[in-house]
Amino acid sequence: MDQPASPLAEIRARIASAARVARRKADEITLVAVSKTHPAEAIAPLIAEGQRVFGENRVQEAQAKWPALIEAHAGVELHLVGQLQSNKAEDAVRLFDCIHSLDRLSLVGALAKAMDKAARQVPCFVQVNIGAEEQKGGCPIAELPALLAEARAAALPLIGLMCVPPAEIEPAPFFALLDKLAADHGLSGRSMGMSDDFETAIQLGATHIRVGSALFGARD
């Protein structure tokens, strides 16, 4: 009997299918495997299957488990997908290869200083509070032009916008809005779409999708 496909193989097949429907190439879409709260023992099998881009929510958690994994496996990229405190900017710049959560002016300065100190340029997405939710991080849409201008003046390597749409609401209009905002501001990257909605995000221009539970199961 055929062995059942692994969760990673299933997600890759769904990415390819969504890309075909959208008349896009699957290799235009980066799968960020969000491994937050999961131990190194759960991550290693995905690396063995060829997954190389992973996401973590917290700097401290990533510091505890990723240095050994990165040393043992060539070519692994680590993305910070959770909110970043300014006092953790230096640690983030040293450890992560991409930051998805630049969302305020104070963090622009902290990251610019940290990158200068480390002599390391880390690509950044600006997180947009696309649903205007008070409990969520992200730059308000009205403040986005000023934040982008400040980040560009500080020579931060901006590559796109990121969002987390409101829960339990059809995400397509929010993805479409992020796509338009990114285009309006000359940014090519769109970090949007998670386990439950990444196929919709791909249809609407996602370049990076952040998939956790569909790969690793429920978080602790």
Image (cartoon, rainbow, N blue to C red):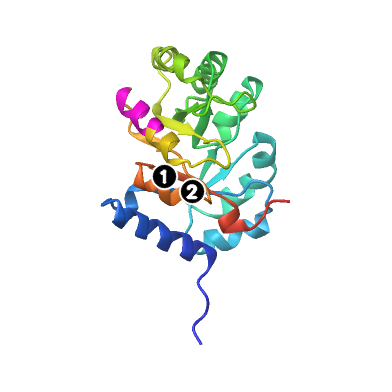
Q: Position of residue 169 (x, y in %)?
A: 53, 40
Q: Position of residue 193 (x, y in %)?
A: 47, 44
Total count of labels: 2
For label 1, count other residues whose C-alpha is less than 10 Å away and answer few (under 14), some (14-19) or many (20+).
Answer: many
Secondary structure category for the residue under label 2: loop
Residue topped by disc 2 = 197
Residue shown at 54% from the left, 60% from the top: 46
CA distance separating discs 1 and 2: 6 Å
Residue type at the position of mark 1: Ala
Inspect the magenta stretch and tell me whether residue 14 lies in it.
no
Residue shown at 52% from the left, 36% from the top: 165
Residue shown at 31% from the left, 28% from the top: 183
**Stretch in magenta:** 177-184
- Front residue of 111/149: it is 149
Q: Are marks 1 and 2 in contact (CB under 8 Å)?
A: yes
Q: Main secondary structure of the magenta part?
A: helix
Residue type at the position of mark 2: Asp
| Marking on residue 21 | none
Residue topped by disc 1 = 201
